[in-house]
Image (tube, helix red, strand yellow):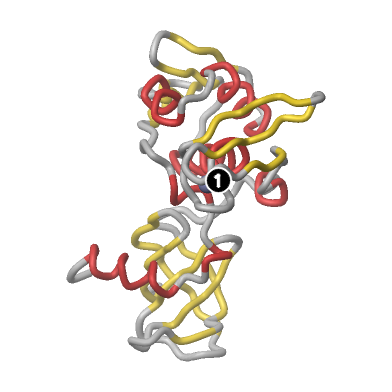
């Protein structure tokens, strides 16, 4: 990986808008730590501050989506289950997509208002309003998603401009250099950033 930033910028240009997920718009990356049987989000307070939402609202969403109990402990959140950073990021991403991001201008400068029992998301940047609805319900069912340093079998569906093979799994776009369109290959995931993954051919 010669220049990761350049790769990322290149990849972003190539991702159609519809494929971008909330996970890429996190304002503050979660600091996720497994402690025994629990998962701690160490900077939970910073995350809710950055999106200006109620800590309990976000916590309850995460508990429900991740099927676990948990509580807030000062600036941290404790979830009573072992979770990967990726799992936490995804649920934070779908929370952002549902309760924070303006779908018109794609900015997070919004607030929630309640009107006739309907929750409305109001954008302070462009004035757009939309009812809140679960944006990514279909994704939240699947817990095992791509993980770094693991091997997967994928189909190369496309070639990027620079000739890298492109595979898609779930919401991910995976770049695999040295592959050809239509081939089925075993890949090793080297790096995941949001919904973009960089892989190489598995060597075994
Ligand atoms: Zn807006």
The residue sitting at 31% across, 65% down in the picture is: 8
The residue nearer to you, when weighing 132 against 105, is 105
The residue sitting at 63% across, 22% down in the picture is: 60
* Residue at mark 1: C-beta within 8 A of ligand 1: yes
Residue 14 location (% of width, % of height): 43, 75
| Residue 181 horizontal side relative to residue 4, left or right | right
| Residue 149 horizontal side relative to residue 112, left or right | left
Residue at the limit of the structure toward the front, as seen here: 127
Residue at the limit of the structure toward the right, as seen here: 116
Residue 176 location (% of width, % of height): 40, 77
> From the viewer's perspective, is residue 189 above or below residue 13?
above
Q: Quadrant of residue 100?
A: top right
Residue 51 location (% of width, % of height): 45, 31
Q: How many labels does the image show?
A: 1
| Residue 107 horizontal side relative to residue 118, left or right | left
The residue nearer to you, when weighing 145 against 89, is 89
> From the viewer's perspective, is residue 130 above or below residue 37?
below
The residue nearer to you, when weighing 99 against 45, is 99
> From the viewer's perspective, is residue 69 above or below residue 151?
above
């Amino acid at each position: 990986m010669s220049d990761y930033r350049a790769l990322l910028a290149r990849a972003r240009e190539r991702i159609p808008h519809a494929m971008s997920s909330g996970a890429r718009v996190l304002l503050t990356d979660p600091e996720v730590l497994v402690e025994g049987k629990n998962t701690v989000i160490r900077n939970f307070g910073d995350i809710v501050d950055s999106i200006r939402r109620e800590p309990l609202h976000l916590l309850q969403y995460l508990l429900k989506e991740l099927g676990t109990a948990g509580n807030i402990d000062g600036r941290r959140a404790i979830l009573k289950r072992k979770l990967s950073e990726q799992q936490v990021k995804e649920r934070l991403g779908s929370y952002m997509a549902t309760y924070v991001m303006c779908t018109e201008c794609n900015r997070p400068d919004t607030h929630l208002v309640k009107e006739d029992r309907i929750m409305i998301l109001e954008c302070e940047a462009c004035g757009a309003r939309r009812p809140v609805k679960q944006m990514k319900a279909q994704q939240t069912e699947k817990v095992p998603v791509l993980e770094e340093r693991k091997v997967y079998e994928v189909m190369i569906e496309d070639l990027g401009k620079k000739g890298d093979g492109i595979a898609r799994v779930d919401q991910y776009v995976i770049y695999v250099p040295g592959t050809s369109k239509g081939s089925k290959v075993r890949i090793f995931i080297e790096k995941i950033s949001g919904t973009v993954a960089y892989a190489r051919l598995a060597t075994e």
